[in-house]
Image (tube, rainbow, N blue to C red):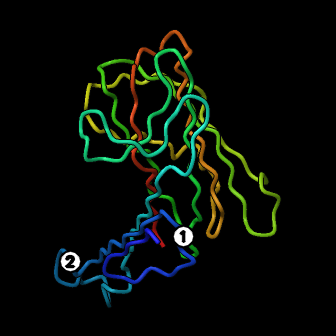
Amino acid sequence: MGIEASSVPVRNHDALAGVSATDHHSNANDHAATPAHHSNANDHATHSKTIKAKPSRVGSTATLAEAGIVNTRRTVTSAGSASADGQVYFTLQVPRDFDTLVRAVIQMTGIQSAVMRWQMDNDFTAIGETSVENTDSLTATDLSMTANVDIELDVAGSLTGIAANDVLGIQFTRRGTHANDTMTRLEISDFILEYTD
């Protein structure tokens, strides 16, 4: 089903097909003896968890699930060109133990040292709400990229107010038709959401 988990089992309702999950545990016992001001360090444990989703579909000038140009062992999604826009979409459900968003990023690689112009348009909806009940976005922004260097693009600002069990519709748009965009090829790998429970 494309779901993989680490040391803590992942419940089926916590991830959609094509979504993987990882659990990261951190507590005071990992770093030092129990502090004097804590009666029990485990009472203050925190949990950081990560879910990852592959692109689910594309629009305009984009190609879903093809071999990378430089790293041919990777399966990537190309988005737009230096003369055409391209949209890449992700769909996933926020796990029911979600409390606080730590980070939300899109992993990508530019094949040239060039400028890539991008924007985000998202919606997120709880079961029982209309499918576009909540929306958020990030306006078009230019990003200078170095050839063949993997980056994580911070898109957390386009997910303000997400909550446990929300279904996310993520739309990344490459604005290749804009004069500032000079990137010939952009390869997108994953959307990553990290949160605490």
As drawn, which residue projects farthest toward the left?
Answer: 32
As drawn, which residue projects farthest toward the top?
Answer: 179
Q: Give me the C-alpha separation between circle 1 and circle 2.
A: 23 Å
Q: Position of residue 48 (x, y in %)?
A: 39, 68
Residue 11 vs residue 99, the one in the foreground: 11
The residue labelled by disc 1 is 98
Instruction: Quadrant for residue 163, please give it.
Output: bottom right
Query: In front of the other: label 1 or label 2?
Result: 1
Q: Position of residue 102 (x, y in %)?
A: 45, 57
| Three-letter amino acid code of the residue under disc 2 | Asp
The residue labelled by disc 2 is 30
Q: Position of residue 148 (x, y in %)?
A: 25, 31
Q: Residue at x 72, y 59 (%)?
A: 125
Mark sitting on residue 166: none
Residue 71 vs residue 14, the one in the foreground: 71
Please tell me whether residue 166 is drawn above or below residue 154 in the rendered image.
below
Q: Residue at x 32, y 90 (%)?
A: 39
